[in-house]
Amino acid sequence: MKAAILNKKNSPLEITEIPIPEIGADEVLVKIMYAGVNPLDNMIVREEVKLITPYKYPLVMGNEFSGVVEKVGSNVSGFSEGDRVFARMPLDKIGTFAEYAAISRDAISKVPDYLSFEEAACVPLTALTAVQSFELMDVKEGESIFISGGTGSLGAMAIPIAKSLGLHIITSGSERNRQRVMDRGVSEFIDYKTQDYSEILSDVDYVLDTLGESELEKEFKILKPGGSLVSLRGLPNHEFAKRMGLSSVKKLLFKFAGLKFDKMAAKKNQKYYFLFVESNGKQLEKVSRIFEEKKIKPSVDTVFELSDVNKALDKVDKGGSKGKTLIKIGE
Ligand SMILES: NC(=O)c1ccc[n+]([C@@H]2O[C@H](COP(=O)([O-])OP(=O)(O)OC[C@H]3O[C@@H](n4cnc5c(N)ncnc54)[C@H](OP(=O)(O)O)[C@@H]3O)[C@@H](O)[C@H]2O)c1
């Protein structure tokens, strides 16, 4: 099969012929139709997530997909040949920029009927990020959340899911994207190029941060005393290392890395969480039910061929997208 391979740090991916993966008893073989491209893929190329999830070369790249079950392992129940499925790949076994992938049945979910393969590939990684963030913060109906940079592909999933949970949503982005996110259920929009959210907002119940270190101080300032903040871009802390079951060395390392933000949070009895999204078929089923009920339509920006995978990565790196960047693989 054809696969896009990373052979070393900071190098372009190479399209190579490799064998179709063998499946284990608890896995299914999926024929990939579309793969989603995320900022995470560029971070893997630059080895920026090496401490959280180390990869060996050569590495088949790609973290999420939509596709069709081609074969099921002997222990697998609930899925059969021909099922339309989607998933975020498990951290220790990525590889969706390829014609086939072997994946644990615990990571996959069936695609809602109303979604095309193209639309479905936009969902798993960012929708799971949103669900996992909301579970960490234990969000409650009627409370308020500030999602920074909600005009991006994370916001495209986090906003409708937050809406379905009954949250009051405030987000920031460029003016040209205001209407698109307002239509998805945002109550208040802040144009970050002309307005400072830290002068407008206060006592927000939750913050979902997509911008990282440079914004965290301001984001804690708008959070109510006792409120919770999940960062997707900040630094991991001790709580993260414990939750992920990382080694004692990494626990110590991340304790120091995240100390500054734990201290910021402690001042007003707030909580600081760092999240690195994991695969989870059960949570994805929950997402599918929400999507099926609300008929949420993901928006696609550009679709590239597998041979143009490096152009797709560049596009995501440059930002300013109007939806998901995808790679079309199967017919
Ligand atoms: N840790 C995890 O597990 C995890 C999971 C998913 C995503 N993430 C991270 O979350 C971030 C967002 O992901 P994404 O897929 O949504 O990226 P994306 O599609 O590139 O979107 C980023 C958005 O941020 C907005 N933005 C840029 N600068 C801003 C600022 N100063 N204030 C407010 N908004 C600003 C942009 O808005 P305009 O285009 O409107 O200007 C853009 O829509 C990335 O850094 C990604 O790595 C982490």
Image (cartoon, rainbow, N blue to C red):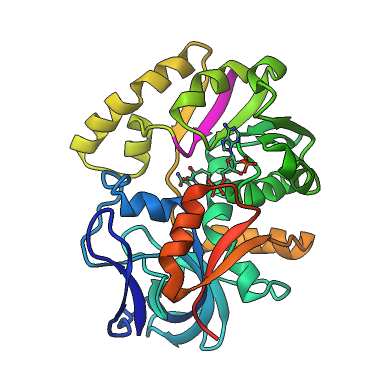
Rendered-image quadrant of the N terminus: bottom left
Q: Residue at x 36, y 81 (%)?
A: 2
Q: Position of residue 15 (x, y in %)?
A: 33, 75
In the image, 255 versus 210, the foreground residue is 210
Question: Does residue 225 belong to the magenta stretch?
Answer: yes
Q: Is residue 264 above or below residue 105?
A: above
Quadrant position of ligand 1 = top right
Q: On the rendered structure, is 140 left or right of 42? A: right
Q: Which quarter of the figure has residue 290?
A: bottom right
Rendered-image quadrant of the C terminus: bottom right
Q: Main SS type for the magenta part?
A: strand
Q: Position of residue 24 (x, y in %)?
A: 31, 79
Q: On the rendered structure, is 152 left or right of 144? A: left
Q: On the rendered structure, is 42 left or right of 116? A: left
Q: Is residue 207 above or below residue 264?
A: below
Q: Position of residue 30 (x, y in %)?
A: 45, 80
Q: Position of residue 281 (x, y in %)?
A: 51, 64
Q: Which quarter of the figure has residue 238?
A: top left
Q: Residue at x 37, y 19 (%)?
A: 260
Residue 63 visible in the current orientation: no
The magenta span reads: 224-233
Q: Is residue 51 above or below residue 197?
A: below
In the image, 81 versus 152, the foreground residue is 152
Q: Residue at x 26, y 43 (%)?
A: 51
In the image, 168 versus 48, the foreground residue is 48
In the rendered image, the residue lying farthest to the left is 249
Residue 137 visible in the current orientation: yes
Question: Does residue 259 belong to the magenta stretch?
Answer: no
Q: Is residue 169 above or below residue 318?
A: above
